[in-house]
Image: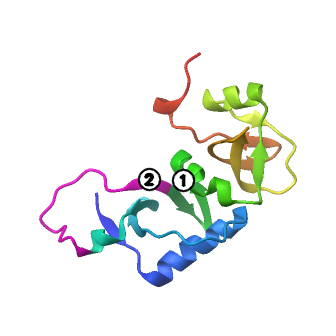
Amino acid sequence: MEYKILNSREMKKTISLLERFGYKKKLDYAFLMNNKNRIFLVNKDFRNIDTSKLRVNNIGMYFGELHANEIRLSIEGSQLIGPDCSENILKLDDEDALDWLRGIDLSKEIEEKGYYLIKNKDDFLGCGKAVDKKLLNYVPKNRRLRI
């Protein structure tokens, strides 16, 4: 898997996509992107390592994926920035949160299409996309509850 270290302009563009969620803080990490437009966060000191002779499967924490000027955050990405976000957060009751963690798309009347942070009480459960009165679930199959 090829990883590209994002330069400051690319990082600013990626961070600006977080404004959809009302996030205004600075992320003090280096950003890596793979060939599938997935963003990974690593310590800034990573830039000092010569990776040309390394064979690695994964580097850093999976933060999210870029889709046509939007970002879909991973579960960990939503947990990292969620507490500092103020917009486009959908709060689920316990029953809907359980369905969400099972990987079920939810029927919701949401006016504006796009990505939303999913929250239950104080916990951020990931990111979903609102389309046609439905909230699409992106919880990976291997992380879903089997209850």
Residue found at the far bottom of this picture: 9
Q: Distance between the residues labelled 1 and 2?
A: 7 Å
Residue found at the far top of this picture: 147
Residue 128 position in % (x across, y down):
67, 46
Q: Residues within 10 Å of mark 2 (few under 14, many from 20)?
A: some
The scheme the figure's colours follow is rainbow
Q: What element carries label 1?
A: helix
Question: Hey, what amino acid is under mark 1?
Answer: Gly
76 horizontally vs 19: left or right = left
Residue identifier under label 1: 77
Vertically, is 137 above or below 84? above
Residue 92 position in % (x across, y down):
77, 37
Location of residue 119 (image quadrant): top right
Residue identifier under label 2: 62
Please report whichever mark, 1 or 2, sits nearer to the chain's N-terminal start.
2
Magenta stretch: dominant SS?
loop
| Residue depicted at x 70% and y 34% | 105
**Magenta residue span:** 48-63
| Residue depicted at x 62% and y 30% | 101
Q: In which quarter of the image is the C terminus?
A: top right
Question: Hey, what amino acid is under mark 2?
Answer: Tyr
Residue 127 position in % (x across, y down):
64, 48
